[in-house]
Image (cartoon, rainbow, N blue to C red):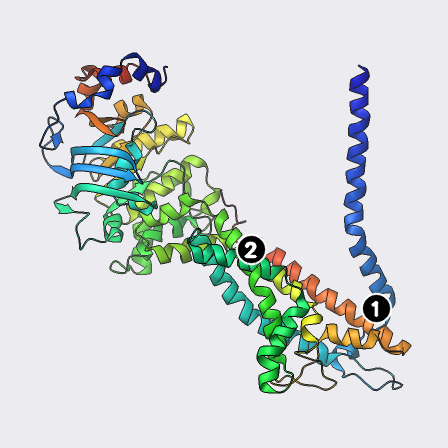
Amino acid sequence: MLQSTEVFREKPPRLVTPAVQVRAREPRVAPGETKPCIVTNHLTAYFGYTTAVKDVSISIAQNAVTAIIGPSGCGKSTLLRCFNRMHETVPSARVDGSVEILGSSIYGENTSPIAVRRHVGMVFQRPTPFPTMSIQANVAAGLRVDRQSHATRGATSEIVEEALQRAGLWAEVKDRLNESATALSGGQQQRLCIARALATRPRVLLLDEPTASLDPLSSQKVEELVYDLRTTVTVVIVTHNLQQAARVSDSTAFLLMGELIEFASTSEMFTAPRDPRTESYITGRFG
Amino acid sequence: MKNARRRHVVSGAMIGLTYVCAVLATLPLLLILWHLIIKGASSISLAFFTHMPRPVGEPGGGMANAIVGTLILIGIASAIGLPIGIGAGLHLAEKKTTPLAQTTRFLADVLNGLPSIVMGIFAWQILVRPIGHFSALAGGVALGAMMIPLVTRTTEEMLLVVPTSLREAALALGYPKWRTSISVVLRTALAGIVTGALVAVARIAGETAPLLFTALGNQFWSTSIGQPIAALPLQIFAYATNAYEELHRLAWAGALVLISIVLVISLAARLVTRSRFGAAVD
């Protein structure tokens, strides 16, 4: 595969003049999808003086899986982190434009990032179980911190079981709920993190390259899980793995150097990409 | 070929040298322990722990007051040094680059290198002189001030070992920032922080210089923090510089007890580090 920089050297006019491309005024909606869940409007994200995400307007469908693909450093993760206000936890990071989730603006003046994150779960590239907590306590971690949903002990253990069931981990850990979470394998740890994110019953689940550090078998389990979750929660998954995007997602967004190049249903994107840059990326000509 | 043989010889010699150095590094402690046991073990009995010092010539007598005094001084020092040190370490780890953090870090290092007798003079100046007499409190403050930079720096280092990904995971779950710092970051680093704290306690337990003009020492039984108090290092110093053979033996025994207290604290530190789940941080 060619490095992306070489591509730019080969065909500079096409890539350094993105203004040629007509950008839609309205947020782009993938065809066939009706109910929007996450809607961004001219979203731009900065790190200091660097722009990581440039003027992205996108409408992500509810209860579906949306994949974000693109070469390294194209702003995929940053875009994802704008959806639960994790972007702003990095010093010097800043966001312009707006993001609405299920109709309410998450960057509104009276919206606290903590409230947003309780409704928008996130799972990271590497499994992050809390090493001092048991498996049970890890799954319940998000519940315990939410004062409004202070569940009783019985209710908590029910919710923990339900979350582990949904993450497909219950059968493997039900007899060892009080053991250390770090004793689990990498793939189990990652599904534990998904269970932890699901326990607070979020409306949206953001997955940031959730299988990047897993072996093929564990990856497959996580993928199946993502596929099953679509009926109950809106999933946005960032991935480096094009086959994965093709397997698990309903719609796919292609990002290049912080810009949204194309957003379409996954089948269309992988069979008949409209933008030549999408085509070169998908056919493996760079990235 | 010739070169290869030469390299083997040099390599073997160097490895041998590291063996010698490793043994030499443990030698002082072993010699000290051996010496203490030979000279002091015979004077250790139940009476040594339960009886008060007796006048020269009278047989028996112990160091009950000095042992209790040392424990009280360690308590006061920990009450001052641990909360301030851990709090400051938390600040340094969370606000790495603010001017306050950078100044604090630098000054903590300077304070760490300060001769311990200067700490004694400092405590004398701010407590003994205004109050008008020596006290256990002044001794504890001097020792506590010595603990602060030690605890601050170890706490900071232990917190920085906690991966950022863990902090992010907590924030993404809807943890407020302060809750993340306390229930995730601090808790993950806790075993390391406790070890650091106990190392600091072990370090100050044997200090003599800061106590010379603060706690002063006391011939009698006293547990009042407003009064001069006996302490093992002071008692050892007083007995060892005395002319009587009998008191020399007691001084050896006192040193053995002091080193045992430090040893027990270090062992406790080891036990605590072996946390419930084996403390495997990624």
Of helix, strand and loop, which one carries label 2? helix
The image quarter containing residue A101 is top left
In the rendered image, the vertical position of residue A26 relative to residue A147, given as above or below: above
**Could you tell which of marks 1 and 2 lies nearer the N-terminus?**
1
The percent position of residue A90, horizontal first and vertical second, equals 34, 45
- Which quadrant would the N terminus of chain A be assigned to in this image? top left
Residue B81 in the figure: left or right of residue B229: left
Label 2, on which residue? B154
Residue A72 in the figure: left or right of residue B24: left
Query: Which kind of residue does numbered mark 2 sit on?
Result: Thr
Query: Which kind of residue does numbered mark 1 sit on?
Result: Ala
The percent position of residue B29, horizontal first and vertical second, equals 78, 56
How would you rate the neighbour count of disc 1 (Cα within 10 Å): few for under 14, some for 14-19, many for 20 or more? some
Residue B43 in the figure: left or right of residue B159: right
In the rendered image, the vertical position of residue A113 relative to residue A9, given as above or below: below
Q: Is residue A252 visible?
A: no
Of helix, strand and loop, which one carries label 1? helix
In percent of the image, x 63 and y 78: which residue is there?
Answer: B124
In the rendered image, the vertical position of residue A74 relative to residue A150, given as above or below: above
The image quarter containing residue B55 is bottom right
Chain letter belonging to callout 2: B
CA distance separating discs 1 and 2: 35 Å
Depth order, front residue of B4/B183: B4
Q: Which mark is residue B233?
A: none
The image quarter containing residue A87 is top left
Depth order, front residue of B218/A264: B218
How would you rate the neighbour count of disc 2 (Cα within 10 Å): few for under 14, some for 14-19, many for 20 or more? many
Label 1, on which residue? B41
The mark total stands at 2
Q: Nearer the viewer, mark 1 or mark 2?
A: 2
In percent of the image, x 37 and y 31: which residue is there?
Answer: A211
Depth order, front residue of A248/A262: A262
